Amino acid sequence: MKVRIAKFLSDNGVASRREAERMIESGLVSVNNVSITSPVFFVDGSEKITVSGKLISADNKTRLYAFHKPINTMTTAHDPMGRKTVYDILPKEYKNLKYIGRLDYKTTGLLLMTNDGELSRILTLPSSNIPRTYIALVGGGDFSGLEHVRHGITVDGIKYRPMKIDTMKNNELKITITEGKKNEIRVVLDAVGLPVKKLHRISYGNINLGNLSVGEIKEISQKHIDELSKSF
């Protein structure tokens, strides 16, 4: 399948798509020994593609990474409000990766990232039923409403699937969801009088955050990718 040359360069770790377009317009990119200056040029990876004379090879291997997202960062490439994004934190060689789902600005913890757009799409589909587990620190002291959440609840006309919830000490809850609607945990818990003060994701399918430091990224083994793929 052919893709735009800028996307090809981005997917293979050369630069962000926007920076790749600037490289192309500056005449730094050649295809089969011919310099191109328009990003409206399509390749399939079989061509001889060079940037400033360096040969770029297609990386066809699916790669999956675990990233420990810090608080007060947006899960997006560009934020119109100028807030810091996860791509401002990631080392340069990882800036071409695609995130799998989103963690909101205040939520911390495990964010999966990949070079495979199709894998990213599948892992975020509600129909894939992939469990994601969080630790939530909540306000309020009446946990009786959690029974409604455990059996599924409708908030403002939106239905939310049942959540697995275990109470912990110090007003913390361990919550596992399989759907991933926008701000799902915050919306549902607020509806039963337990506003979320802190939210931290510790696992996504069979991938655990473990002791990964804040802002650190590590590659997931092929074995774990295979096991995760078998679950959907």
Image (cartoon, rainbow, N blue to C red):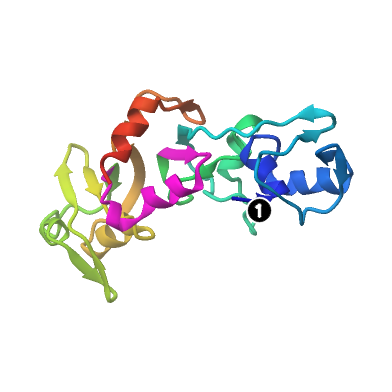
- Relative to the observer, which residue lies in front, 160 or 144? 160
Q: Visible in this render: residue 103?
A: no
Q: How many marks?
A: 1
Quarter of the image holding residue 187?
Answer: bottom left
Q: Residue furthest bottom?
A: 157
The residue drawn where x is 45% and y is 51% is 104
Magenta span covers which residues? 110-132
Within the magenta stretch, is there residue 171?
no
Q: Residue 83, position in %: x, y?
A: 61, 50
Q: Residue 68, position in %: x, y?
A: 45, 33
- Relative to the observer, which residue lies in front, 129 or 39? 39
The residue drawn where x is 37% and y is 48% is 123
Quarter of the image holding residue 26?
Answer: top right
- Relative to the observer, which residue lies in front, 105 or 195? 105
User: Three-letter amino acid code at disc 1?
Assistant: Gly
Q: Residue 35, position in %: x, y?
A: 88, 42
Compared to residue 13, the image places residue 145 above or below, namely: below
Compared to residue 68, the image places residue 39 above or below, namely: below
The residue drawn where x is 25% and y is 58% is 189
Within the magenta stretch, is there residue 130?
yes
The residue drawn where x is 79% and y is 34% is 50
**Judging from the image, what secondary structure is the residue with disc 1 in?**
loop
Q: Which residue is mark 1?
A: 82
